[in-house]
Image (cartoon, helix red, strand yellow):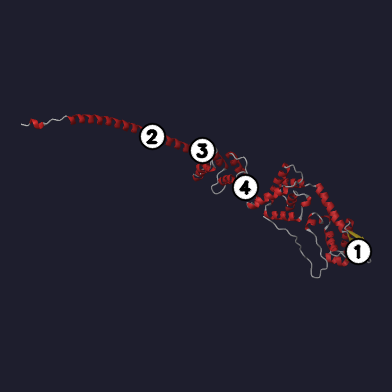
């Protein structure tokens, strides 16, 4: 599934607004607001929308306090605490109810970057993933952090974050937790430590296969995993070692194990082994296995190995009986032929003797007219 990413802004200004504030989501996700208390955050937003030239800010304290729903004392405390962070540089005001300062945007960004680096150094991507894998339950933020940890820090942009958000909407959390476990295992086999080029591509390949096969629940994922494992077992029993060499064969195995008349793995394995045993002159074709074993098993509703063995024995006994019957029939026919031949031979000899006698009497002639009175 392809996603189109674009920058989106939400405008909360009114027609008479003279100054707009753009605060990116990536900055917030990196912990920008985490360094301020609730009151400090409100006051900072007010300051950022009231900046004059050269980053100068002048506030009427009663007006600002009323806009923020704060007491003037609370407002002054928040301004004092913001000054302690280095984000604003207070200046002497001309009157008691005024506050004048300069905004240090560089201090804001620099401090946030230093905080992100310190956090990254204290908790590696591998540790984030292990915490997720070992946890019994995890929030969406923890799952998202584990997924994006497979990327190098420089590649963790807004597009990737939007992509991960779409996965959180489309798949169950337990599925994504399992995804993290699999890719982390693959990463360790490849010798990667925290992240490795290609890890995120491997992760996306798994996600794409889920979309194609319409797997969106953890239960369905377990069923699909079971089908893949059993298919490989059938392939090995049949003699296939390279599982990507012939996709059509693997689909045939899967068809035996799925659908309304799905066979158990044990029955399908028994059918393959019996076919291989009987076909001693070479590997049996899948059509041979289907025609002689798989289809009869389905037609007779055989659902266990004991019934399968009894059916095999019955088939073997039936073939033996047919063979005996053919032998007896052939023997009887042979005897009849021999007797018939003997009879014909005897009759032939008798006929020959009769012919000879007939020939003798034929030559003997008496002219009885000569002896008439």
Q: Quadrant of residue 325?
A: top left
In primary-sequence order, the first of circles 1 and 3 is 1
Mark 1 touching mark 3, by CB under 8 A?
no
Decide which of 215, 310 is in the foreground and name it. 215
Q: Quadrant of residue 89?
A: bottom right
x, y percent for residue 355: 23, 31
Q: Badge 2 is on which residue? A: 330
Q: Badge 1 is on which residue? A: 100
Mark 1 touching mark 2, by CB under 8 A?
no
In primary-sequence order, the first of circles 1 and 2 is 1
Nearer the observer: mark 1 or 2; the answer is: 2
At 85% from the left edge and 54% from the top edge, which residue is drawn? Answer: 111
In primary-sequence order, the first of circles 3 and 2 is 3
Residue, far left: 373
Element under disc 1 = strand
x, y percent for residue 304: 53, 41
In primary-sequence order, the first of circles 4 and 2 is 4
Q: Badge 4 is on which residue? A: 224
């Amino acid at each position: 599934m392809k996603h189109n990413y674009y920058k989106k802004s939400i405008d909360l200004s009114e027609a008479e607004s003279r100054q707009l504030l753009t605060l990116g989501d990536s900055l917030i996700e990196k912990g920008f607001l985490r360094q301020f208390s609730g009151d400090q955050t409100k006051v900072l937003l007010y300051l950022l929308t009231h900046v004059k030239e050269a980053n100068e800010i002048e506030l009427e304290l009663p007006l600002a306090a009323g806009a923020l729903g704060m007491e003037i004392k609370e407002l002054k405390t928040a301004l004092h605490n913001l000054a302690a962070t280095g984000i604003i540089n207070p200046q002497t005001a001309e009157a008691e109810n005024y506050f004048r300062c300069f905004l240090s945007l560089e201090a804001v960004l620099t401090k946030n970057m230093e905080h992100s680096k310190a956090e990254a150094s204290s908790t590696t991507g591998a540790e984030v993933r292990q915490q997720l894998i070992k946890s019994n339950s995890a929030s969406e933020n923890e799952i998202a952090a584990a997924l994006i940890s497979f990327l190098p820090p420089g590649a963790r942009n807004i597009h990737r974050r939007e992509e991960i958000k779409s996965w959180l909407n489309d798949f169950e959390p337990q599925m994504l937790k399992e995804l993290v476990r699999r890719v982390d295992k693959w990463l360790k086999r490849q010798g990667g430590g925290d992240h490795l080029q290609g890890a995120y591509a491997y992760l996306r390949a798994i996600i794409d296969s889920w979309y194609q096969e319409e797997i969106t629940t953890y239960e369905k994922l377990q069923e699909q995993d079971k089908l893949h494992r059993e298919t490989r077992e059938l392939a090995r029993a049949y003699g296939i070692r390279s599982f990507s060499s012939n996709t059509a064969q693997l689909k045939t195995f899967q068809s035996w194990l799925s659908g309304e008349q799905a066979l158990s793995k044990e029955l399908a394995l028994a059918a393959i082994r019996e076919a291989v045993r009987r076909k001693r002159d070479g590997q049996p074709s899948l059509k041979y296995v289907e025609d002689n074993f798989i289809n009869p098993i389905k037609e007779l509703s055989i659902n266990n190995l004991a019934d399968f063995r009894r059916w095999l024995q019955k088939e073997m006994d039936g073939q033996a009986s047919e063979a005996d019957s053919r032998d007896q029939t052939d023997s009887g026919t042979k005897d009849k032929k021999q007797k018939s031949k003997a009879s014909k031979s005897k009759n032939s000899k008798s006929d020959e003797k009769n012919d000879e006698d007939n020939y003798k009497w034929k030559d003997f002639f008496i002219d009885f007219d000569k002896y008439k009175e």
